[in-house]
Amino acid sequence: MEMTIGKRIAALRREKNLKQDDLAQILEVSPQAVSKWENDQTCPDISLLPLLAKTLGISVDELLSGKQETQPTVTYVPEQQRKDIKDMMLRIAVVSGDGDKVRINLPMALVQAAMDMGLEPPQFSGNDALKEVDWAQIMELVRHGAVGNLVEVESADGDTVRIFVE
Amino acid sequence: MKIVVKSKDGPKLRIPIPTGIVFNRFTAAFAPKYLKKQGLNVTKEQAVAFVKALNQYRRKHPEWVLVEAQSSDGERVEIKL
């Protein structure tokens, strides 16, 4: 099912850990206006789209069309500009061959704590495509400043798994 | 924790579960014994550190959605901690 612009705004706002009030303040509109957008009762004014898209971390085209999910390439962040690893998020997006989507948002602090305990994400995801992923290597990449789309795997049965860090 | 189920046309279902009862220092102290049965050797200190990290993150990011699932027919499930 194609996601509406309102649902897209709501999902991206939550990903950014913003409340409706926060987004309203950034865009200088009322929280009720944001609520109406997210419930598909109204659409944001065209003049607000660039700032709205920038705030949500996507392009205006992606915001309007929703055809392409954000697929950041891997970038190296210099040590001085890196976020604290405790504030970073590891996202696992699984799209099954028949169109079902699952997204797991794991704070890096928890991933680190789980790995210290000997747990690895596949043990709680159960997805076969994730079993081949070297989680220790991913942690190493992140510690050295790599962010973005770190892994993309397509399984034989058509599932696509993408792991990205932001 | 809140589990939200939204069907395409039907009503929303919200199931609130008090996460504090599940993830606290007390339950973390018992977790190693249970996890050992599952073949995982976890110390009490590690379990407490995990729960502490989880609770710190929850407080800092109250809008955090742990799992979002969307079926091809439009049903959505969200698990917020």
Image (cartoon, coloured by chain):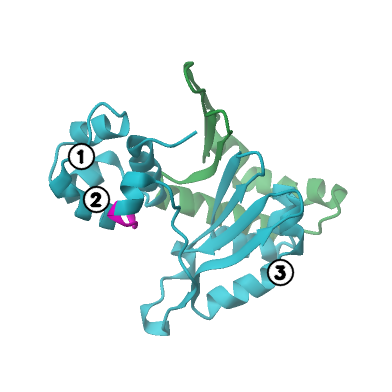
| SS assignment at label 1 | loop
Proximity of marks 1 and 3: CB atoms separated by less than 8 Å:
no
Image coords of residue A90 (percent x, y): 54, 60
Q: Say few, some or many: other residues with alpha carbon within 10 Å of mark 3 (under 14 / 14 to 19 / 20 or more).
A: few
- Mark 1–mark 2 distance (CA, rounded to whole Å): 9 Å
Pinpoint the chain carrying mark 3: A
Pinpoint the chain carrying mark 1: A
Circle 2 is placed at which residue position? A52
Proximity of marks 1 and 2: CB atoms separated by less than 8 Å:
yes
| SS assignment at label 3 | loop
Circle 3 is placed at which residue position? A134
* Residue at 42% over, 37% down: A3
* Residue at 58% over, 42% down: A101
Image coords of residue B61 (percent x, y): 41, 50
Circle 1 is placed at which residue position? A44
A153 vs A85: above or below: above
